[in-house]
Amino acid sequence: AELDTLDIIVLAAILVGTVAYFTKGKYWAVTKDPYASSFAAANGAKAGKTRNIVEKMEESGKNCIIFYGSQTGTAEDYASRLAKEGKSRFGLETMVADLEDYDFDNLDAIPNDKVVVFVLATYGEGEPTDNAVDFTEFITGEDPSFSLGNDVPLDNLNYVAFGLGNNTYEHYNSMVRNVNKALEKLGAHRIGEAGEGDDGAGTMEEDFLAWKDPMWTALAEKLGLEEREAVYEPIFGITDRENLTREAPEVYVGEPNRMHLDGTPKGPFNAHNPYIAPIKTSYELFNVKDRNCLHMDIDVSGSNLTYQTGDHVAVWPTNAGEEVDRFLDIFDLTGKRHNVISVKALEPTAKVPFPTPTTFDAIARYHMEICSPVSRQFIATLAAFAPDDESKAEMTKLGSDKDYFHSKVNTHCLNISRLLANVSKGKKWTNVPFSALIEGVTKLQPRYYSISSSSLENPKLISITAVVESQNLPGRGDPFRGVATNYLLALKEKQNGDPNPSPFGLSYEITGPRNKYDGVHVPVHVRHSNFKLPSDPSKPVIMVGPGTGVAPFRGFVRERRKMVEDGKTVGKTILFFGCRKSAEDFLYEKEWEEAKQVLGDKFELVLAFSREGSKKVYVQHRLQERAKEINELLQQKAYFYVCGDAANMAREVNTVLSQIISGERGIPEAKAEEIVKQMRAANQYQEDVW
Ligand code: FAD
């Protein structure tokens, strides 16, 4: 059997303990940093920590625990914000906890003067996030067994629930809905509504803000809490390490964890530990001046990373130098950017989100999402630290008026430093405690890409197909540029021979911390997905992937091509691809021709160019034209795949498919919709959308 991460951590902890015993701690003095954050402990020695939540609350004196099930960091961020607000407004003793870190069989032993909050994201096709799988299985299971064995097991439990979902997916917010239902069934008492945030409508943040106010009122009433004037209290303490320079071997200058600092990092490579992978080839796929789409082949042969066709690769980006400069400048940290600091949680249950000792520069460049959308709540917090009364008044207005905020901030895609500079007319924000920035700016997140290679053909080469994010927005001087894709563009330029690439004037610390990414490397890990070809290759497949939605289908087609080369028989393989113009953004045109040479009439490419004829033609229209054939293939149990834009395309394809089934089989549309739902449930209809 494979060792899972916990086993490895346990084994590592035993080994470290044994070594420590026999060396009588003599190596510890060298490596131990008295100011070091709990980060290393949190990541390295989980085995020693209790998994008993009741015990944990008792020993740390907490009466409110906020669990998060998070994939991309938003749920975790909301959990931290609730913890902070509960403490500052109501004096609750709050703690944030990763669902993965605790057991749940003693939820029934949490006394009723305490409260448990669940902030739960739904991932993909109604699935729990990776860290919430065990919890979900337990709580929604047939007959969860609890420590006390009471008739109404959770009669003592007070809980609050908020879900993060996306209405463009079939199973909208199913995590919070299912967990809420399960908790109610077990007799737990919910306080306030079970909130639902909708990323699909772009209202996640506002849904959260609108939900939490009445929730706090209900919670205060239930627990008899008095609201007090919220004063800012830092969660993190910052210590200057004047005796250290950034060259010192124990200082993190962007390394993601201890292993990367100490030497060659070993696996397992995962969301806590990226593999620094060489880029083997990279090139531009578009044939047009103002838009870019990258193809990149990443070599993972030097690692134990594996993937299967249809999986996702996560890229760990670094921020553009110009944005790092802007961020440090507005908070008057430019002069101190390379000073070494230690960051420590002042609160035993809080975690510093990056390893320390480190520098302000490294934090802003490698660890903080300094370019992401700004939260309205954070603006309200920063108002207290404005450099003058006028800025303070403007911040208060932005923080309290949602429409004003939207028109001033969101529509221009302003990030925190651009916004603050606009508000104060360039005056620096010298009073903002650095802790407030660690709390208010989220952790820099890896970006996911649907792997566009086939593991059968190339088990150790992972391909990415990524369109470079760039938008001209009215009322904003320069175009908005995405974090990860422009970083990848710079890497591509470097890989093709430019020693100092600066696409669109953006420069990057492209050789990474201590030049460890030199020779053109990019930090990555792999996330396994359920988006898979049928295990029987003779089954027909219908793939719908316009734009970069074609990424996984390049992998699928290459896989089937390889199968044929290996002497296997494959079923009909139809790909619907769409783009603007055949001469501009027709991805992998040559490769499809080569595939046709091998696959013959088993392979068909159906094209939709939206800006060529007098009428806009999209993949959905092409599907409709092929109604008869598609229906026949589905009746032969063809697998149907959709990849790409979740907001519009995937939804329309779903509707069109129902119409096709209804029309061809002569059944009412409602019935056809039911059939499509069943196809999804049986994995005959699979989506990979974003
Ligand atoms: P970001 O900087 O993250 O910006 C992305 C968007 O966020 C912007 O367009 C804007 O709408 C919003 N935004 C960012 N900052 C602000 C701000 N300050 N204010 C307001 N709005 C803001 N992409 C591909 O090209 N190919 C793929 O194969 C692919 N596969 C994916 C698979 C999965 C499972 C997922 C989840 C996503 C996939 N994506 C894919 C999308 C990809 O992960 C990235 O989201 C995309 O490349 C943009 O990343 P970025 O860092 O360049 O842009």
Image (cartoon, rainbow, N blue to C red):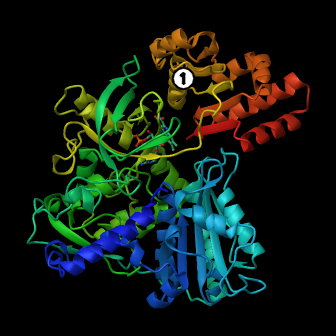
- Is residue 278 found left or right of 102 in the rendered image? left
Q: Report the side of 258 relative to 145 (left or right).
A: left
Q: Which residue is mark 1?
A: 563
Q: Nearer the viewer, residue 14 or 340?
A: 14
Q: Quadrant of residue 434?
A: bottom left
Residue 572 to residue 232: above or below: above
**Residue 643 point in image, percent of width and height:** 58, 33
Q: How many marks?
A: 1
Measured as percent of width and height from the top left, residue 301 is found at 33, 38
The response on whether ligand 1 sits within 8 Å of label 1 is no
Q: Along the horizontal axis of the image, is 588 left or right of 260?
A: right
User: For residue 242, which quarter of the picture?
Assistant: bottom left
Q: With respect to residue 95, does 387 lie above or below?
A: above
Q: Nearer the viewer, residue 228 or 284?
A: 284
Image spot of residue 525 (x, y percent): 39, 47
In the picture, the quarter occupied by the C terminus is: top right
Residue at disc 1, secondary structure: helix
* Point 33% across, 45% down: residue: 303
Q: Position of residue 195 (x, y in %)?
A: 66, 64
Residue type highlighted by circle 1: Met
Picture residue at 56% right of the left edge, 89% below the top: 226
